[in-house]
Amino acid sequence: MLLRLRWFFLSILVLYFWMTPDNALLTDSSALLSFIPPGIITGLERIFSLVLVVVGVSYLLASLHQEQLIAAIYWLATPFSFTGLGREKLALRLVMGIDAVNKLATSPRFKDENGRGSGKSLYYRVTRSLQYYYQYALSCAEQDSDKEYSFDCLLPPALWQWCFPVGLYILFLLAGREWL
């Protein structure tokens, strides 16, 4: 998943390199790395935080089954039930969203009948592709309109499973700390 974000990380690094003033972040504690432009340092801090988020999400998606993930979000949404947000509706929307993403991921790819070299503009090709996927999503929704969802066993997560979010929180605190 990190490889998919490499251009995004590079753009963050370039933007911070060009947009950060030269001497705004230099302090006495950063004398060791004074030869590195401060924009690179702040860009790397932001990239490190995003890498932590991506690694955390990847770990959760790889280690939890769909039922466990839904149960965890169901129990984490408990404080919102006091505001009128139903936990059951949130869990149902989550399941429906995951099903839709899985169906779209396995959907047949859009193939432009005219091809790339036909002289059609990029705008035309993008709008045709979006129309195709929108129609495919509508047809899948019509097929699943009678589908029933049930949540049989939404038990709270085990106590040891809270160690990962707490550890991730500690990593975020350490990433945001001034080390230089």
Image: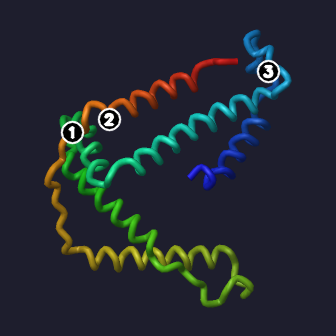
Q: Which residue is painted at 63% across and 78% down in the image?
A: 124
| In the image, farthest residue toward the left | 152
Q: Is residue 76 left or right of residue 25?
A: left
Q: Residues within 10 Å of mark 1 (few under 14, many from 20)?
A: few
- Relative height, residue 180 to residue 52 (above, below): above
- Mark 2 lies on residue: 161
Mark positioned earlier in the residue sequence (3 or 1): 3
Looking at the rendered structure, the kind of residue marked 1 is: Pro
The secondary element bearing badge 3 is classed as loop
Q: Give the x, y percent position of residue 56.
A: 47, 41
- Mark 3 lies on residue: 33
Mark positioned earlier in the residue sequence (1 or 2): 1
| In the image, farthest residue toward the bottom | 113
Q: CA distance from mark 1 to mark 2?
A: 10 Å
Q: CA distance from mark 3 to mark 2?
A: 39 Å
Quadrant housing the C terminus: top right
| In the image, farthest residue toward the top | 28
Q: Which residue is painted at 47% across and 24% down in the image?
A: 170
Looking at the rendered structure, the kind of residue marked 2 is: Gln
Looking at the rendered structure, the kind of residue marked 3 is: Leu
